[in-house]
Image (cartoon, rainbow, N blue to C red):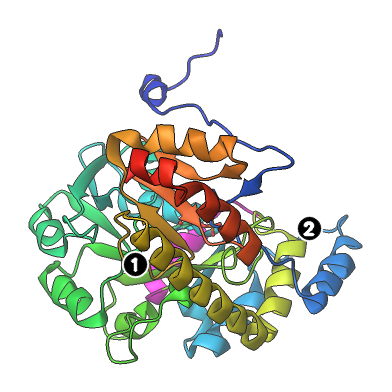
């Protein structure tokens, strides 16, 4: 290496690809197991024929479709190369000094500390509660005059837990209006809280200009491989996001597939009911085997196995099921097809496994 690279990047671990065995069941990445709908597959094929042309950098058609779907204006919608790109762009538009602070719960989405460091800002991690929920009081208490951005992951990845609308509103009441709060709702479509308690960031944001909501086509819409996510917020926030957006990073195929999938949202959202039923069964079986499993509102369940997490994931891989361990904290298991969940359960609930790990 001869060129000088920012020395602080040395503390960010180099990317390690997830394990992949062709024959293993993969319950490690919170993907959906269904392929794209026929209408999306057709849109993908048609868009691919125009691959020699740049995509629409303004993502106009998809933004208009999202605005109509959500009941907001186009000026309130930005689209990114996955919502993870928008996480990074949100740090870029709020932080401009190493002393600037980004507050988030921990453990939460693993990209938050990375995008904070890449943005040359300071991460402030607030531990989850004993019940594996965001500690919203402690997060509000962690706000200082250096705080520029707060990520609230609801439902939380990887613990699966979610706060209801009233708790979120109470928290937001305590955050100064000049601090931008990101409600990251990547798993929004899997929430099954009652209509009165169900948190909907887009609704909450209507009266709070310092709230921006992130959602994605990667999970319930099944387009993880194409990379499309979106932000909904105040036009000034959205305008700033468009300024830092990497030009043309939401490609033509992704835009076409997202529009087709949004048109078929009824069919896609029906699939989430099937997944939620499986989630209940998976959790019930794990609880019955003696594991601690917090209630999940997402497409995965969380096993807080602490120092035994890596060992559990390795044993699961030997049994042909890849799950996602977070060293020292727990193991996240994506809800898959019934036969995949069964294969995982036959490993996890086997008397010798349960005796070793629960
Ligand atoms: C909480 C959360 N936010 C954002 C993302 C990013 O999703 P994508 O970049 O695929 O839209 C994920 C993906 O796992 C996530 O768990």
Identify the magenta region. Answer: 233-247
Prevailing secondary structure of the magenta residues: helix
Q: Mark 1 points at which residue?
A: 154
Mark sitting earlier along the chain (2/1): 2
Residue 185, image x, y percentages: 41, 68
Q: Residue 56 sits in which quadrant? A: bottom right
Residue toward you, 331 or 200: 331
Image-based side of 265 in relation to 196, left or right: right
Quadrant housing the N terminus: top right
Q: Where is 91 relative to 217, above or below? A: above
Residue 140 can be seen in this image: yes
Neighbour tally class for label 1: few under 14, some 14-19, many 20 plus, Cα within 10 Å: many
Q: Where is residue 120 in the image (x, y as percent from the top left)?
A: 33, 36
In-front residue for pair 264/128: 128
Left of 82 or right of it: where is 185? Answer: left
Give x and y (percent) for residue 317: 56, 37
Residue count near mark 2 (Cα–Cα under 10 Å), binned few <14, some 14–19, many ≥20: few
Nearest to the observer: residue 156 or residue 323: 323
* Most distant residue in the top direction: 2
**Residue 29 visible in the displayed image:** no
**Real-space Cα distance between discs 2 and 1?**
35 Å
Give the numbered dot on residue 228.
none
Please name the residue shown 50% across and 33% down the image. 314
Callout in the foreground (2, 1): 1
- Whether 71 is drawn above or below 330: the answer is below
Q: Quadrant of residue 192?
A: bottom left
Q: Which residue is at a point 74% across and 66% down the rendered structure image?
A: 35
- Judging by the rendered image, the residue that carries numbered circle 2 is 54
Q: Does the magenta stretch include residue 43?
A: no
């Amino acid at each position: 290496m001869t060129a000088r690279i920012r020395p602080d990047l040395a503390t960010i671990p180099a990317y390690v690809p997830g394990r992949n065995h062709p024959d293993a069941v993969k319950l490690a990445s919170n993907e959906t197991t269904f392929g794209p709908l026929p209408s999306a597959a057709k849109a993908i094929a048609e868009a691919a024929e125009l691959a020699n042309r740049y995509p629409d950098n303004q993502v106009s058609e998809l933004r208009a479709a999202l605005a109509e779907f959500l009941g907001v204006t186009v000026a309130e919608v930005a689209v990114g190369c996955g919502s993870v790109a928008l996480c990074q762009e949100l740090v870029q538009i709020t932080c401009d000094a190493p002393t600037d602070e980004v507050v988030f719960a921990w453990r939460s989405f693993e990209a938050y500390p990375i995008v904070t460091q890449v943005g040359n800002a300071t991460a402030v991690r607030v531990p989850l509660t004993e019940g594996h929920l965001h500690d919203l009081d402690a997060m509000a208490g962690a706000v200082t005059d250096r705080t520029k951005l707060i990520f609230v992951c609801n439902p939380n990845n990887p613990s699966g837990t979610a706060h209801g609308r009233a708790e979120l509103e109470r928290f937001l009441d305590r955050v100064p209006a000049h601090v931008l709060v990101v409600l990251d709702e990547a798993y929004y479509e899997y929430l099954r809280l009652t209509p009165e308690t169900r948190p909907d960031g887009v609704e909450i944001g209507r009266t709070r200009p310092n709230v921006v909501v992130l959602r994605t086509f990667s999970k319930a819409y099944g387009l993880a491989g194409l990379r499309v996510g979106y932000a909904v917020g105040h036009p000034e926030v959205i305008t700033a996001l468009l300024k830092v957006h990497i030009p043309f990073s939401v490609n033509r195929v992704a835009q076409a597939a997202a529009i087709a999938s949004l048109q078929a949202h009824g069919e896609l959202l029906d699939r989430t009911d099937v997944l939620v039923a499986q989630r209940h069964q998976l959790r019930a079986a794990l609880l019955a085997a003696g594991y601690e499993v917090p209630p999940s509102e997402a497409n995965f369940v969380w096993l807080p196995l602490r120092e035994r997490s890596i060992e559990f994931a390795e044993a699961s891989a030997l049994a042909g099921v890849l799950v996602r361990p977070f060293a020292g904290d727990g193991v996240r298991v994506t809800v898959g097809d019934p036969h995949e969940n069964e294969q995982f359960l036959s490993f996890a609930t086997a008397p010798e496994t349960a005796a070793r790990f629960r």
